[in-house]
Image: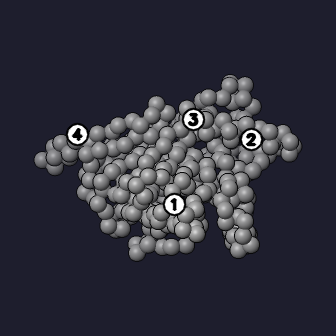
Amino acid sequence: MAATAERIAADRMEIRPLTGALGCEIFGVDLANLSDGEFAQIHQAFLDYSAVMFHDQVLTQEQFAAFGQRFAKLEDEPFLPHRGEVPGVFYLRGAPKNGKTLSTQNLGWHADHTYQRNPSMGAMLYARDVPAAGGDTLFASNYLSYEGLSPAMQAFLDDKVAIHDVLQYGLNSGHHSAATVGAIEMLWKMRQKFPQTEHPLVCRHPETGRKMLYLNQAWTIAIKGLNRDESDAVLTMLKRHSVRDVYCCRFRYRNNSLMLWDNRAVQHSPNSDYTGQRLMWRLALHSDWQPGT
Ligand SMILES: [Fe+2]
């Protein structure tokens, strides 16, 4: 009986791909009351599409955290100071500066926590109070950027290792806070907590097994074993290549939208083109995966 009800509920779920590259929207599901069958479909969509959006979800913080915990245990976000009421949930606030300029989330393309040995599995944002327009999130597929390289470049990169460094927060990305002394001191404290780490430039996704180009514009600073000019030239090319339009999708939020992404398989870029207040709840999904293993 329970299995039948579960199958009927799962049949109502509709997965609509957003682009030919990656990304989908899922309709016909209530994230506060998920059956195991529905979760299995959502988890498969998470792996297949890398970025998934739901709309019109009504969740408490406990329910938001519980949905995250179906994927993995939750982890702290070192750069977000405002903790929610429930462990693992953080407030992500974009506020106007001087009443009209852009928000504080101008980080540009990055993947979360790659300056750590074990980058996040993924993350979720739940839109609580968002502007009518603006603040979209863009995603770029690490699978497609790898597959779009020539066989000769793929072979060249196959055994190369890149260095990721938290000190680059802002310096490579355009985050305005890097211009202040306080921000630079904060970065230095972060660097003491998170020393430089190394990840292979090409690796396989731990669940799908697909090969990926593994780098991001914010934290990847050098290719080990190359001289400075060589490293800069190749990384500049790869960073530009990795976010080509054909590898990307873009999501627009409205209140009660929930965004979920596979941080292992994508870079993302929060678009800071809005001027009003914005409040999201955020959580990060922990992974013990070390790229290349
Ligand atoms: Fe991020």
Q: How many numbered badges does the structure rendering display?
A: 4
Q: What residue type is labelled 3?
A: Asp
Q: What residue type is labelled 1?
A: Thr
- Which of marks 1 and 3 precedes in the sequence? 3
Disc assigned to residue 176: none
Residue farthest to the top, as pictured: 151
- Inter-mark Cα distance, 2 to 3: 17 Å
Depth check: give the residue in front, 57 or 63: 57
- Which of marks 4 and 3 precedes in the sequence? 4
Q: What residue type is labelled 4?
A: Asp
Residue 9 spot, x, y in % from top left: 20, 45
Q: Residue at x 57, y 46 (%)?
A: 267
Disc assigned to residue 11: 4
- Viewer-side label of 2, 3: 3
Depth check: give the residue in front, 95 or 156: 95
Q: Name the residue under label 2.
A: 236
Q: Which amino acid does label 2 sit on?
A: Thr
Q: Name the residue under label 1.
A: 275
Q: Name the residue under label 3.
A: 245
Q: Is residue 245 above or below residue 114?
A: above
- Viewer-side label of 2, 1: 1
- Which of marks 1 and 2 precedes in the sequence? 2
Question: Does 218 sit left or right of 22 as displayed?
Answer: right
- Inter-mark Cα distance, 4 to 2: 45 Å
- Label 3 residue SS: helix
